[in-house]
Image (cartoon, helix red, strand yellow):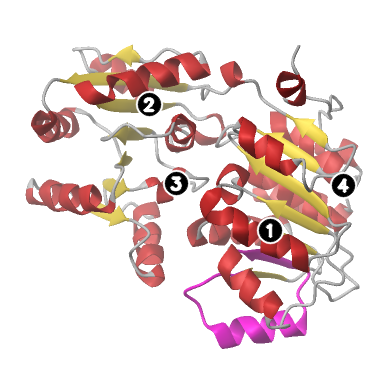
């Protein structure tokens, strides 16, 4: 067996069946049950304990399996409430995800005397400075704003004991890796690091060796286990690119579904599709990274309330963002990166709910679909003529 393959082997096999076995504080346990968790999910059974023990962690589990709950519970148990200093940082690549993690931290930690703060761009810099200077136990942040606070000495890194990185494959990728390296220089050298993601490409695993300590707990789901259980995957072969939109309209007219996310590869396609679907009489919202933060938040709040039936999005929405009533994801354009497929499709069927993913595949995208099938050892079925079969999966 070669070295690269060995490195992908899981080395942490301890697991618990109940939250009580983790010997958590009474108030944290109370918060977990109040939040709605009854028994730990597969990733929670394995990955909470090494965090509590102070080990570095490399944990891979697909979207919607309780990753956020895993590192939140581990992080909250690691905090000393009597020390009003920043002890934990949770990093997320996008603001929406940071806000969602913050809500989970507040929910699970509601009975603890712990203060959390969401440190993201698009919010008042002055307020952020004041909060950081006062000292909060746990900060959920996007990289840019965090670096700003640390560089300008508003945030004291002295007492930081745990750095959690969510969507680590993206955070360590080219666009973010310089930011991450800068953050590492400013936190204590012996800080505990926990990396979480649905996918860990080999180059990210290699990169992580530069900063993860000896004895890192590796909790890795094999590629063939990565297809999202409970999610039925279909494709529609589109002969001509210009037929895609008409096929989509027919699909929406004939499918009974409360809400869905429609993924595109570019902001331009999102804008065009939003306008064309609106003209067809559908209730549609759109979201992409070039929109103002406040506008993006408003779109998400309204979509979660059910104000729109369709949310057209770039891959900004492809990571970790949870909409309870969502059971259908449509890839209007097939993702260019095979790792991105898992993130997108994971929007449907979160926390074990059933869901459907429909891929609209033009001729030039057919090879991408075959790549995904091969890479994840999964089967994406051709869309049946009788939509009753699809409806059954959605109900």
**Considering only order in the chain, which callout, 1 or 2, is on the residue closer to the N terminus?**
1
> What percent of the width, then of the height, locates residue 19?
81, 39
The quarter of the picture where the C terminus appears is top left
Q: In 3D space, how far apart are the residues under numbered discs 3 and 1 (Cα atoms)?
A: 32 Å
Q: 215 or 98: which is nearer to us?
A: 215
Based on the displayed image, in which of its 4 quarters is residue 217 positioned? top right
| Measured Cα–Cα span from mark 2 to mark 1 | 38 Å
User: Where 272 sits versus 248, above or below?
Assistant: below
Task: Name which residue lies at 55% across and 29% down.
Answer: 352
Mark 2 lies on residue: 356
* Whether residue 182 is situated above or below residue 256 in the rendered picture: below
Q: Of helix, strand and loop, which one carries label 3? A: loop
Give whichever of discs 3 and 4 has the lower sequence position.
4
Which of pointers 1 and 4 indicates the residue nearer the eye? Answer: 1
Name the residue furthest front. Answer: 2
Classify 10 Å Cα crowding around label 4: few (below 14), some (14-19), many (20 and above): some
Secondary structure, mark 2, is: strand
In this rendering, the answer to whether 129 lies above or below 307 is below
At mark 1, the secondary structure is helix
Identify the residue position indicated by label 4 in the image.
Answer: 52
Which of pointers 1 and 4 lies earlier in the amino acid sequence?
Answer: 4
Q: Mark 3 points at which residue?
A: 323
Q: Toward which corner of the image does residue 318 lie, by quadrant?
A: top left
Asked if residue 65 lies left or right of residue 334, the reply is right
> Magenta residues?
119-141
* Residue to which mark 1 is pinned: 181
């Amino acid at each position: 067996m070669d070295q690269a393959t060995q490195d992908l082997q899981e080395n942490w096999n301890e697991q618990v069946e109940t939250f009580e076995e983790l010997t958590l504080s009474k108030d944290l346990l109370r918060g977990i049950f109040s939040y709605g968790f009854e028994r730990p999910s597969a990733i929670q059974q394995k990955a909470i304990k090494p965090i509590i023990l102070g080990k570095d962690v490399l944990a891979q589990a697909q979207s919607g399996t309780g990753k956020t709950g895993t590192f939140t519970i581990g992080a909250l148990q690691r905090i000393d409430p009597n020390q009003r200093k920043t002890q934990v940082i949770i990093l997320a690549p996008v603001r929406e995800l940071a806000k969602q993690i913050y809500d989970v931290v507040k929910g699970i930690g509601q009975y603890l005397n712990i203060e959390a703060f969401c440190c993201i761009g698009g919010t008042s810099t002055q307020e952020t400075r004041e909060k950081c200077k006062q000292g909060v136990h746990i900060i959920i942040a996007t990289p840019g704003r965090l670096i700003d606070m640390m560089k300008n000495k508003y945030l004291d890194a002295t007492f930081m004991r745990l750095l959690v990185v969510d969507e680590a494959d993206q955070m360590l990728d080219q666009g973010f890796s310089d930011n991450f390296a800068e953050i590492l220089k400013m936190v204590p050298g012996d800080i505990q690091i926990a990396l979480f993601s649905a996918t860990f490409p080999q180059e990210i695993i290699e990169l992580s060796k530069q900063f993860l300590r000896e004895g890192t707990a590796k909790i890795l789901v094999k590629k063939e286990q990565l297809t999202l259980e409970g999610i039925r995957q279909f494709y529609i072969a589109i002969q001509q690119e210009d037929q895609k939109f008409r096929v989509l309209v027919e699909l929406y007219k004939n499918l009974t579904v409360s809400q869905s996310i429609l993924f595109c590869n570019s902001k331009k396609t999102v804008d065009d599709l939003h306008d064309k679907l609106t003209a067809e009489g559908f209730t549609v919202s759109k979201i992409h990274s070039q929109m103002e933060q406040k506008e993006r938040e408003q779109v998400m709040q309204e979509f979660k309330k059910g104000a729109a039936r369709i949310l057209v999005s770039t891959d900004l929405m492809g990571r970790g963002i949870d909409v309870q009533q969502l059971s259908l994801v449509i890839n209007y354009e097939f993702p260019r990166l095979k790792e991105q497929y898992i993130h997108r499709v994971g929007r449907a069927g979160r926390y074990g709910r059933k869901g459907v993913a429909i891929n609209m595949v033009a001729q030039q995208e057919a090879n991408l679909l075959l790549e995904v099938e091969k890479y994840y050892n999964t089967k994406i079925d051709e869309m049946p003529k009788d939509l009753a079969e699809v409806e059954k999966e959605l109900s």
